[in-house]
Every structure is written in structure tokens, then in C-alpha cells.
Amino acid sequence: MKFSLLDIYTVLLQRNGNLAWWPGETDIEVCVGAILTQNTSWHNVERAISNLKKEDLMSADKILSVSSERLSKLIRPAGYFNQKAGYLKGFCKFLKLYSLPKLSKMEPCEVRDLLLSIKGIGPETADSILLYALDLPIFVIDAYTKRILSRIGIVSNKATYQELQDLFHNKLPTDIELFNDYHAQLVVLAKDFCNKKPKCSECPLRIAGICCFN
DNA sequence: CGCCAGGGCCTCA
DNA sequence: TGAGGCCATGGC
């Protein structure tokens, strides 16, 4: 590999500055957002979160106290609302056993396995919760990460979630702030340049000589 | 109108 | 274990 993951990060950081990411006022709001944003644009998630907060429902107990029908209706803008209502209920039920403060003091791998055992919490959602709500040093992989790294040529387009995550964990220092901002930088790059139809000619990674896709 | 967006589950081989 | 169908809204 000609360029390291830190080289890439340096270019992105210089462009955007530190992004101090994940819009969410509270830890539970981060978790709810992580579930609602599955395959969904953040703009639609914001409407759903806004509906929940308007009804003063942004807590595990309150989400459990309303009917699934009402919850579905409130999160409707986020899409897949019937599925996601069930996912939210399941996650909140889990929080009755393990509170967020308690989880943040446990071993990251242990918490990850617990989260993955919840229906509707897959690798990306679990890792988003681990990093952005629990402040545990786990790197979040998403479709953007995979697209960017495969276009650069660092991984194949068939790379698995684990392969990508191992790469970041092995090549980067274990640093929560770095993991947090790096993922944010990749999301911004993907939205601004590395979309389905990439704008390679203006891409900062191409200008820096790191990416030669297209 | 079609495509896409910060996935994950179920089924079936 | 991996490929394919399914879930659904809103922006462009």
C-alpha cells in the first residue's frame, strides 16, 4: 500500500478540520439515530427524531410505554417504520437490563456481542453505538467506507465488514477521537465527492495523489 | 419518473 | 456463508 490510512486522514482533516461528529444531544438519542438511519438518509431520520422529542419520548422507558402503532407513526419519515419500531422496542428492553453508563464501563468486545444479539442491531449499528454513544474505541464501517477504500484500491469491492474493520484497527492507533473524526471525514467525503457517480476531478484525495479511480 | 440514502433480517442453496 | 428479496420514506 503506497499511502497509509493516516495519510488519507491527514488530507481530509486539512480540508474539513475536526468534525466533532454525530448530531445527537444525548446518548439515547445517538442510539435511536443509529437504528433509524439504517439505509436511510439522515435528513429523514431528523424528522423522526424531532417527532419523538416533540412528544417527549426520547428515553428507553417512554419508548417502551407507547404502543408500537404510535411509535411507528412517529418514526414514519425514517422509512421501514414498522421494522424500526420493533428494533427500537427491542433495544430499549435491552437497556432495562444494561444501562448505557454500565455498558460504557465494560469490555468493548463484550458490549459488542451483547448489542449484536439484539434483533435489528447489526455490525454498523452496534459499532456506531459503541463509538458515538459509549465512547469505546471501535471503528465504524459503512457503505461509504467500503466504497472509498475500494476505489482507492486498498481493499477489493468484496471485502467484508470484518476485513475493513480489522484494517482500521490494525493500522491506526487506538484513539477514540481519531476513530470518531475519521469516520465522519469519510462520510463527508462520500457525500461531497465519492458518491455513486463520483466527482473524481475535484476530489481532495485525487488532488493529493492518493486516489486514481477514474 | 427512477434512483438513492450512514442496514439488517429471513430464506434458500 | 453468501446471494437475493424485502422493508418505505423523502429529496433530487
Image (cartoon, coloured by chain):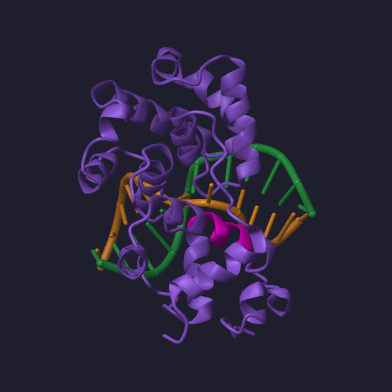
Chain colours: A purple, B orange, C green
Closer to the camera, B2 or A135? A135
- x%, y% of residue A133? 41, 37
Instruction: Specify the quadrant of the image occupied by residue A27.
Output: top left
Dominant secondary structure (helix, strand or loop) of the stretch shown in magenta: helix
| Left or right, A191 with reference to A57 | right
Q: Give the image quarter of residue A61.
A: top left
Give the residues in magenta.
A183-190
Which residue: 68% across, 74% down? A203
Residue A144 falls inside the magenta stretch: no
Asked whether A176 or A92 is in front, the reply is A176
Give the residue drawn at x 61%, y 84%.
A209
In the figure, A16 relative to C8: above or below?
Answer: below
Query: Would you identify the image quadrant in which residue A171 lies?
Result: bottom left
What residue sits 25% from the left and 27% below the top? A98
For residue A148, say whether it is visible: no
Q: Position of residue A8 (x, y in %)?
A: 52, 72
In this rendering, position of residue A5 left or right of residue A23: left
Frontmost residue, A26 versus A97: A26
Is residue A189 a member of the stretch shown in magenta?
A: yes
Residue A1 at least partly seen? yes
